Image (tube, grey):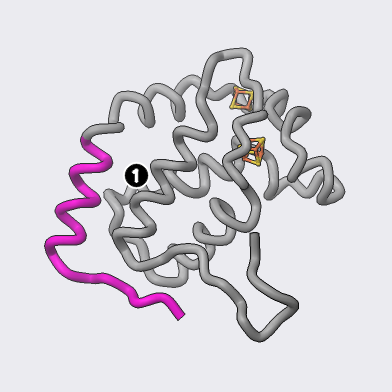
C-alpha cells in the first residue's frame, strides 16, 4: 500500500507542478471538443472492448482535469481512482493522436507527477502472477 502524503511541503510541490503546467492544462481542457478521434489510436482502448473509461480524453479529464480544478485537494479515494486511470489504463506509449494537438501523454505524465507527490503511484503485486508492467 502506498504511503499517502498529506504534508504541506507535498501540497506546495503539487502547487508548483500545476503552476508550471497551467497553460498547457488549461488550454488542453478548453480545446478538447470530445470528438474521440484520439481513442482510435489508443491500443489500450481498442484492446479493452472500447471501454469508454480507456479513451485518452476521458483519462485526461478525469485525472489532471480533476486535479487541476481542485488544486490537488482531492480525497484519497479520488486519487485511488485516478491512479488506475493513469497507470493501469495508460502506458504513456505516446501513440494517441489528437487533431487539435493536445498532448495526452504530457497531461497524463503531469497527473502522475502529482500523484507521486501525494504518495499514490504504481505498485507491484508480489502475490499475483508477477510484477505488473
Ligand atoms: S482527439 Fe483531441 S479533441 Fe478529440 S477527444 Fe481526443 S483530446 Fe479531445
Ligand atoms: S499514451 Fe496512453 S492514452 Fe495515449 S495511446 Fe498510449 S495508452 Fe493510450
Q: Quadrant of ligand 1?
A: top right
Horizontal and vertical percent for residue 60?
A: 52, 40
- In percent of the image, x 68 and y 27: which residue is there? 38
Does the segment drawn in magenta span residue 76?
no
Q: Quadrant of residue 21?
A: top left
Can you identify the residue that label 1 sits on? 69
Horizontal and vertical percent for residue 19?
A: 21, 36
Magenta segment, which residues? Answer: 1-19
Residue situated furthest front in the rendering: 130
Does the segment drawn in magenta span residue 12?
yes
Please, what is the dominant secondary structure of the magenta stretch?
Answer: helix
- In percent of the image, x 72 and y 35: which residue is there? 42
Residue situated furthest bottom in the rendering: 127
Q: Quadrant of residue 68?
A: top left
Q: Secondary structure at mark 1?
A: helix
Horizontal and vertical percent for residue 49?
A: 86, 49
| Residue 83 drawn above or below residue 93 | below
Query: On the picture, is 45 further left or further right than 110?
Result: right
The answer to which of 109 and 82 lies nearer the viewer is 109
- In percent of the image, x 65 and y 22: which residue is there? 97
| Location of the C terminus (image quadrant) | bottom right
Amino acid at each position: 500500500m502506498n504511503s499517502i502524503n498529506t504534508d504541506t511541503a507535498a501540497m506546495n510541490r503539487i502547487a508548483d507542478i500545476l503552476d508550471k503546467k497551467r497553460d498547457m492544462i488549461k488550454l488542453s481542457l478548453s480545446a478538447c471538443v470530445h470528438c474521440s478521434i484520439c481513442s482510435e489510436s489508443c491500443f489500450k482502448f481498442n484492446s479493452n472492448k472500447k471501454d469508454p473509461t480507456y479513451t485518452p480524453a476521458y483519462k485526461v479529464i478525469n485525472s489532471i482535469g480533476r486535479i487541476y480544478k481542485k488544486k490537488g485537494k482531492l480525497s484519497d479515494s479520488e486519487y485511488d481512482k485516478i491512479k488506475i486511470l493513469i497507470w493501469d489504463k495508460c502506458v504513456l506509449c505516446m501513440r494517441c493522436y489528437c487533431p487539435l494537438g493536445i498532448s495526452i501523454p504530457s497531461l497524463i505524465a503531469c497527473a502522475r507527477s502529482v500523484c507521486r507527490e501525494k504518495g499514490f503511484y504504481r505498485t507491484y503485486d508480489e502475490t499475483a502472477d508477477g510484477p505488473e508492467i
